[in-house]
Amino acid sequence: MTREEAYSELIKYVDNKNLLKHMLSTEIVLIRLAKHFDQDPDLWGMAGLLHDIDYEDTKEQPEVHSLKGAEILESMGLPQELVYAVKVHNERHGLPRISLLDKALYATDPMTGLIVAGALIRPDKKLSGVDVPFLRKKFDQKAFAKGADRQQILTCSELGLSLEEFLGYGLEAMQGISIELEL
């Protein structure tokens, strides 16, 4: 499946513009991480792009979220490595994070929200005004971006990355698509 085909499938399931931006953010960060770890950027990007394909249908049933998504992705014929990473990104299922992709998707999912929140409080509301020291400072403020699970972001250590390195890769990647993100 090409990226364009995947995106066409995605918009059949997702209408929310902000959710689509989150998924685009996760896609680009995972592509950046795949390159860092010498992994398949197409596979990793596809996992990021499609990881919340079922969210609009399951947001009131978090115990089902990602299981339904995995079924959708399986029916599309996507690789099991991608399907499992999507399934395991919801910790409610208690599935172990085994591959680098599993670990990267899990840690990246909330990090994108932290970065977006950092941009939105800047005077110009742009990613260009955000840097890693700013994000690191905001990371320690519990009231800031409350939905960005800090413990989940800190699992970047399972990838062998410090928080600062991880935030740096994420910010750099998202700044590269700032026009699409309208940030």
Image (spheres, rainbow, N blue to C red):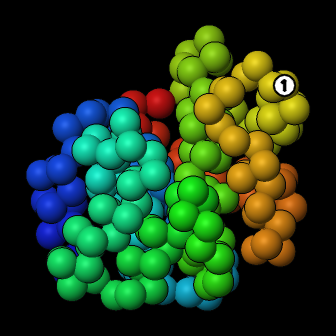
Please name the residue shown 28% across and 33% down the image. Answer: 17
- Residue 60 in which image quadrant: top left
Q: Which residue reaches farthest top? A: 123
- Residue 33 in which image quadrant: bottom right
Please name the residue shown 86% across and 61% down the image. Answer: 162
Q: Position of residue 152 (x, y in %)?
A: 71, 52
Q: Position of residue 14 (x, y in %)?
A: 22, 45
Q: Is residue 10 left or right of residue 45?
A: left
Please name the residue shown 68% across and 27% down the image. Answer: 146
- Residue 2 in which image quadrant: bottom left
165 to 101, vertically: above or below: above
Please name the residue shown 61% across and 27% down the image. Answer: 117
- Please name whichever residue, 90 or 125, is drawn nearer the observer in this view of the structure: 90
Can residue 100 be seen here? The reply is yes
Q: Which amino acid is tagged 1?
A: Gln
How busy is the neighbourhood of tag 1: few (under 14 within 10 Å), some, or many (20 plus)?
Answer: few
Q: Which residue is mark 1?
A: 141
135 to 98, vertically: above or below: above
